């Protein structure tokens, strides 16, 4: 820690050490730049809660085709991204090419699933329509009443916790400075972002020589708190809204016969329910979607709804031990798409607002930001996600 002296300077300073910040720090260090990531707890954040479903096709929403392209670009990179992490660190990321089965529980769900299938076909996406019987043949634990299914062979999964640990280690090995402190103010000099003032943060021990840290380029990657950094010019980025997700972790006792072989999801009473079975026997069930500020309380109602809906889908889950309940905050932008690249303030880029897709979009965000930071050019894939798209809307209205 002693190398972080007050007034220290680096090439790139990343504010936020969740998987988005760590991923782009790692890739940027691989391009030969000196990188520091400031966070009170590197590897924390929403990825510690997320189920880790990599589902650009089954989570597709109407009108979000640019996001679909970004999601597919990231999904396509995932296997290599994880293989490289494992080769470098010796750590498993829990990446599993399982595919995903979306199912319909009643006639309304079936109509909605059929619309999604038609949308996939119009976009040339690979998804296969199944009868209820065919869906149950793939996943025998599904409820007998399942009406139909949609099999998407390329929507996979990763373990967000293992991924976070591997990214912390990869950053260390690549020489990224992981500074355990809180950025309490953005320092702007003239017309340019110059650095941050550091605080110790709650529960963070004082760092010898902490005070300020300056950099040629800064990246704000602080999830749902990104817009709250003191010193950030007003209206530079829009407010990022926290969208709470409660999630359950069950354990399939070992030795176990496969309980589910792939991700299973459904729309139940308008909410998205999914189950992600991991290779180590963990079964993750998510997630609620609640907009009520920065609250991460796990509620009886949230747990009840998840268990009720999951039980309708896979009745056998009630036999499994419930080992953990948790809640995290998805960082939602006004259009639910991420903000990637330079802002109107020279020296400051952002990588935030990933909403439901933070885990999925980690590899592509890392590559796009590293490319921008190393070359100064914004890659074409990132241009629809420019942070200034909101400023254009505001000034033209
Ligand atoms: N991508 C799943 C969720 O946000 O709940």
Image (tube, rainbow, N blue to C red):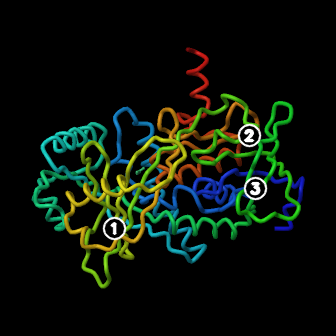
Q: Position of residue 12 (x, y in %)?
A: 75, 51
Q: Nearer the viewer, mark 3 or mark 2?
A: 2
N-terminal of the two: label 3 or label 2? 3
**Disc 3 to disc 2, how far (Cα)?**
26 Å
Q: Position of residue 322 (x, y in %)?
A: 35, 70
Residue 240, placed above or below residue 196 = above
User: Is residue 126 left or right of 234 when viewed as pictured?
Assistant: left
Residues at marks 1 and 3 touching, judged by CB atoms closer than 8 Å: no
- Disc 1 is placed on an element classified as strand
- Disc 3 is placed on an element classified as loop
Q: Position of residue 37 (x, y in %)?
A: 71, 57
In terms of image quadrants, where is residue 28? bottom right
Farthest residue in the bottom direction?
A: 255
Which residue is at the front of the view, 324 or 314?
324
Q: Nearer the viewer, mark 1 or mark 2?
A: 2
Query: 10 Å neighbourhood of mark 1: few (<14), some, or many (≥20)?
Result: many
Q: Circle 2 sits on which residue?
A: 230
Residues at marks 3 and 2 touching, judged by CB atoms closer than 8 Å: no
N-terminal of the two: label 1 or label 3? 3
The numbered disc on residue 277 is: 1
Q: Circle 3 sits on which residue?
A: 33
Q: Nearer the viewer, mark 1 or mark 3?
A: 1
Residue shown at 75% from the left, 58% from the top = 181
Q: Position of residue 215 (x, y in %)?
A: 81, 48
- Disc 2 is placed on an element classified as loop
Note whether ligand 1 is within 8 Å of mark 1: no
């Amino acid at each position: 820690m002693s190398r972080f002296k007050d007034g220290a300077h680096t090439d790139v300073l990343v504010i936020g050490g969740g998987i988005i910040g760590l991923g782009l720090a790692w890739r940027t260090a691989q391009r030969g730049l000196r990188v520091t990531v400031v966070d009170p707890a590197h590897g924390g954040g929403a990825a510690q809660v997320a189920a880790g479903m990599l589902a650009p096709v089954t989570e597709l929403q109407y009108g979000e085709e640019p996001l679909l392209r970004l999601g597919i670009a990231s999904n396509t990179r995932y296997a290599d991204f994880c293989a490289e992490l494992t080769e470098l660190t010796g750590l498993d990321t829990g990446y599993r090419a399982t595919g995903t089965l979306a199912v319909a529980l009643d006639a309304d769900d079936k109509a909605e699933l059929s619309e999604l299938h038609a949308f996939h076909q119009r976009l040339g996406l690979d998804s296969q329509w199944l009868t209820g019987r065919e869906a149950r043949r793939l996943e025998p634990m599904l409820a007998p009443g399942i009406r139909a299914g949609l099999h998407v062979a390329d929507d996979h999964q990763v373990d967000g916790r293992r991924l976070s640990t591997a990214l912390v280690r990869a950053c260390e090995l690549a020489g990224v400075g992981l500074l355990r402190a809180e950025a309490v103010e953005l320092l702007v000099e003239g017309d340019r972002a110059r650095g941050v003032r550091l605080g110790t943060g709650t529960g963070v021990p004082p760092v010898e020589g902490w005070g300020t840290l300056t950099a040629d380029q800064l990246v704000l990657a602080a999830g749902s708190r990104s817009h709250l950094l003191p010193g950030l010019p007003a209206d530079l980025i829009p407010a990022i809204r926290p969208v709470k997700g409660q999630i359950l972790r069950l354990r399939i006792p070992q030795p176990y016969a496969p309980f589910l072989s792939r991700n299973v999801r459904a729309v139940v009473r308008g909410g998205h329910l999914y189950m992600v079975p991991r290779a180590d026997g963990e079964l993750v069930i998510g997630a609620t979607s609640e907009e009520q500020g920065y609250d991460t309380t796990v509620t009886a109602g949230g747990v009840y709804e998840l268990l009720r809906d999951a039980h309708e889908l896979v009745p056998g889950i009630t036999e499994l031990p419930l080992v953990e309940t948790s809640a995290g905050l998805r960082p939602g932008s006004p259009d639910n798409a991420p903000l990637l690249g330079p802002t109107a303030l020279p020296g400051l880029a952002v990588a935030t607002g990933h909403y439901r897709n933070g885990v999925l979009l980690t590899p592509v965000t890392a590559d796009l930001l590293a490319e921008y930071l190393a070359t100064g050019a914004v890659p074409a894939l990132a241009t629809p996600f420019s942070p200034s798209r909101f400023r254009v809307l505001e000034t033209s209205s």
